[in-house]
Amino acid sequence: MKILLYASALIIVGSCATLSHKEKIQAIKKRIVIAHPTKVKAYANTITASELKKHLLKFSSDDYQGRKVGTNGQKLAVNYLKNYYISENIASPFGGSNYFQNIPKSYLGEKYDDSENVISYIEGSEKPNEVIIISAHHDHEGIHENGEIYNGADDNGSGTVALLEMAQAFKKAKLDGNGPKRSILFLHLTAEEVGLQGSRFYTQNPAFPLKNTVANLNIDMVGRVDKSHKYNPNYLYIIGADRLSTELHYISEVVNETFFNIKLDYKYNEENDRNRYYYRSDHYNFAKHNIPVIFYFNGEHNDYHQTTDTEDKINYPLLEKRTRLIFATAWQLANQKKRIIVDKS
């Protein structure tokens, strides 16, 4: 009888503790006030599947020869990005028409020629020294020995064109007098495929001091559906959001619940995940500096790192919705009253 009572007490205490934890989470979420919800929805809606497709048709085309680090194809690709920002009158943090952060061959290694990150930004109206970095790598695998081109439409043409559309949306908001309170840096990274070297170089040579970086939202493959979600494609893997900032994790969830209702899948966020995705894309070089990160990812598919990763297989309505989610999350981080808190390490 005593054993039974003791066991029952444990069950009750456990249930109360669980309920208390749930209440705590709800309290955290209630404290998150969405900044200008009508406006964020309006500007997010300027991100369209048709414009994403227009960019990706070009960026993942044979013209850019697989965008291998330091090659002529990669040079053509970065000039496409630079010319886009110039055409949209979105500034470079370096001033003038210099959008390139040059990385020398001596840094990248003997196998690769000089390469470059491409950087643009929109200055914040109230707290310009606090910076949200949205990143995506633009390089890929080049040309196969059989002559076939690794077009890299999903990896990572999808993330690259998402940045272009988000930059345009933030620029439109600024022109309308609704620009972000904090600065937004759009960072197209090179040499991800050869050891995250572009992001490592950036964190060693930042355009703005790393202590001013509020968060990094990193996008790497967001245009496809993996096998696990074949029958429920309305999902996105979220990796790293809670590793350094509890607040960032819940901002991500509240923004999604308010506007999009995408299934945020945390499968690969487990610390014992055998794939170790948290360590395998450019956000990790920011996390190493105690900067909160979110890695957005659709998971691997049969065309991953194959010459069959082509534009025709992209799910454009889904890419649109995912890009809008990331835009709205960046909007919240840029416009809420207080900078997010780093409460873990």
Image (cartoon, rainbow, N blue to C red):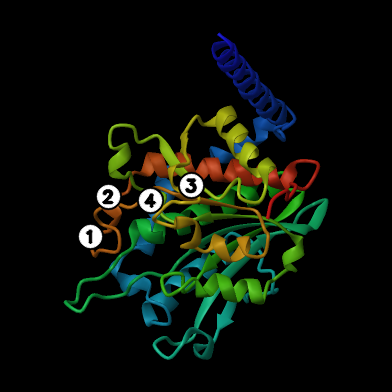
Image position of 8 with respect to 75: above or below: above
User: How far separated are the C-alphas under marks 3 and 1?
Assistant: 30 Å
As helix, strand or loop, the secondary structure at mark 2 comes to helix
From mark 4 to mark 2, how far is it between C-alphas?
A: 11 Å
Measure how far apart labels 4 and 3 are at the Cα level. Answer: 33 Å
Q: Is residue 130 left or right of residue 236?
A: right
**CA–CA distance between discs 3 and 2?**
29 Å
- Total number of numbered discs in the rendering: 4
Residue beneath label 1, please? 308
Comparing 277 with 305, the one in front is 277
Question: Which mark's residue is nearer the viewer, 3 or 2?
Answer: 3
Quickly name the residue at label 3: 270
Please state, as top left, top right, bottom left or bottom right, where the C terminus lies in the image: bottom right
The residue wearing badge 2 is 313
Circle 4 or circle 3, nearest the eye: 3
Image location of residue 49, percent across then percent down: 41, 43
